[in-house]
Image (tube, rainbow, N blue to C red):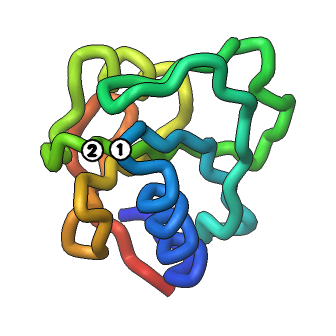
Amino acid sequence: MEKMSRILLLDLLDGCKQTYPNEFFAYLGKTKDVIDHFIAVPIFYQTEDSVAYYKHTKPVDFSIVGTIHSHPSGNSSPSSADKHSFFSEGNAHIIVSYPYTLDRVAVYDSAGKRIQLELV
């Protein structure tokens, strides 16, 4: 189970809404045992089906524990590309599907297995 700041998640849901109909993407950072901040990277390609950034723009930040991105399609299941990126990007990956509400949040580990999220 992962713990995350409720305020942060609500802010990120707002980011997903602001980016709609395109995908939203950010890295997640943890302080102690709570995901409490995000790290944005420059996006060079963004559509309703995908988002891309140059891997070298990912900061060297040892607080990074995973990612968050949106699925404008409404499906919160990870794609094969999502699962591939999960393996190399930490152990907490959030997919938020349209309409970007708390009940549309799904969290996966690095193997693509669904895990629980506790909001604090």
Task: From the image, tell me which residue sits under label 1.
Answer: 21
Q: CA distance from mark 1 to mark 2?
A: 6 Å
User: Residue at point 29% right, 42% down?
Assistant: 71
> Quick check: 110 above or below 7?
above
Q: Nearer the viewer, residue 80 or 117?
A: 80
Asked if labels 2 and 1 touch by Cβ distance under 8 angstroms, the answer is: yes
Q: Residues within 10 Å of mark 1 (few under 14, many from 20)?
A: some
User: Residue at point 50% right, 26% down?
Assistant: 46
Task: Say which element carries label 2.
Answer: loop
State which quadrant residue 72 falls in.
top left
Q: Which mark is residue 72?
A: 2
Q: Position of residue 30 (x, y in %)?
A: 68, 59
Question: 104 left or right of 44?
Answer: left
Residue furthest right as drawn: 60
Q: Position of residue 88 (x, y in %)?
A: 52, 20
State which quadrant residue 56 falls in.
top right
> Quick check: 30 above or below 62?
below
Q: Position of residue 104 (x, y in %)?
A: 22, 64
Q: Nearer the viewer, residue 63 or 85?
A: 85
User: Residue at point 45% right, 56% down?
Assistant: 16
Indicate the amino acid at tag 2.
Pro
Q: Earlier in the sequence, mark 1 or mark 2?
A: 1
Q: Quadrant of the N terminus?
A: bottom left
Q: Position of residue 31 (x, y in %)?
A: 74, 65
Task: Say which element carries label 1.
Answer: loop
Indicate the amino acid at tag 1.
Pro
User: Residue at point 69% right, 44% down?
Assistant: 64
Task: Indicate which label's residue lies in the foreground, 1 or 2.
Answer: 1
